Image: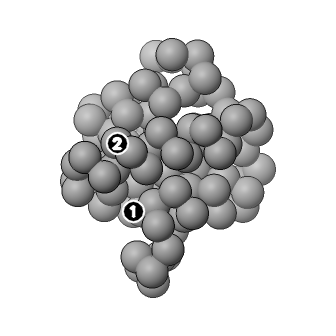
Amino acid sequence: MKKIAGGALALTILLASTAAYAESTEEMCVRVSKEWGTQGDVAGQCSCLAGKAAEDAAIDEELRSLGDNYSSDQEAYDSASDGTKAAFDSCSVNS
């Protein structure tokens, strides 16, 4: 497993409340990253994740769910599907 840096997983994770659909995936990711105390290039990682989410509605939905249900980058990553983990990994500063 790649070391998760910068935790855009906050996404992570891209990552938000059900009312969050009013905010973009990128905005939600940045907000959740701040709440989780994520370090690193959060803006860059969230932008990357938003791009992945725009290409795949399932990733977008899962990112939002992860933000609702977890309280750290690692928890969100560990609970993510393989497809969402791949998005996290490709957006990591270590990729």
Please give the name of the residue rendered at 45% of the width and 25% of the height, measured from the top-left corner.
Answer: 89
Please give the name of the residue rendered at 40% of the width and 54% of the height, measured from the top-left corner.
Answer: 63
Residue 62's x, y, as percent? 33, 55
Asked if the residue at tag 2 contacts the one at tag 1, i.e. Cβ–Cβ closer than 8 Å, the answer is no
Residue bearing mark 2? 52
Q: Helix or strand or loop: what does disc 1 sit on?
A: helix
Q: Helix or strand or loop: what does disc 2 sit on?
A: helix
Residue 4's x, y, as percent? 58, 27
Please give the name of the residue rendered at 55% of the width and 46% of the height, measured from the top-left corner.
Answer: 46
Left or right: 36 with respect to 12? right
Q: Which colour scheme is used?
A: one colour
Q: Is residue 73 visible?
A: no
Spatial CA distance of label 1 from label 2 is: 16 Å
Tell me, for residue 65, which label it has, or none.
Answer: 1
Q: Is residue 50 visible?
A: yes
Number of on-image labels: 2
Residue 49's x, y, as percent? 45, 43
Disc number lying in front (1 or 2): 2
Say few, some or many: other residues with alpha carbon within 10 Å of mark 1 (under 14 / 14 to 19 / 20 or more): many
Q: What residue type is labelled 2?
A: Lys
Residue 54's x, y, as percent? 31, 52
Which picture quadrant has residue 36? bottom right
Please give the name of the residue rendered at 47% of the width and 67% of the height, measured from the top-left corner.
Answer: 24
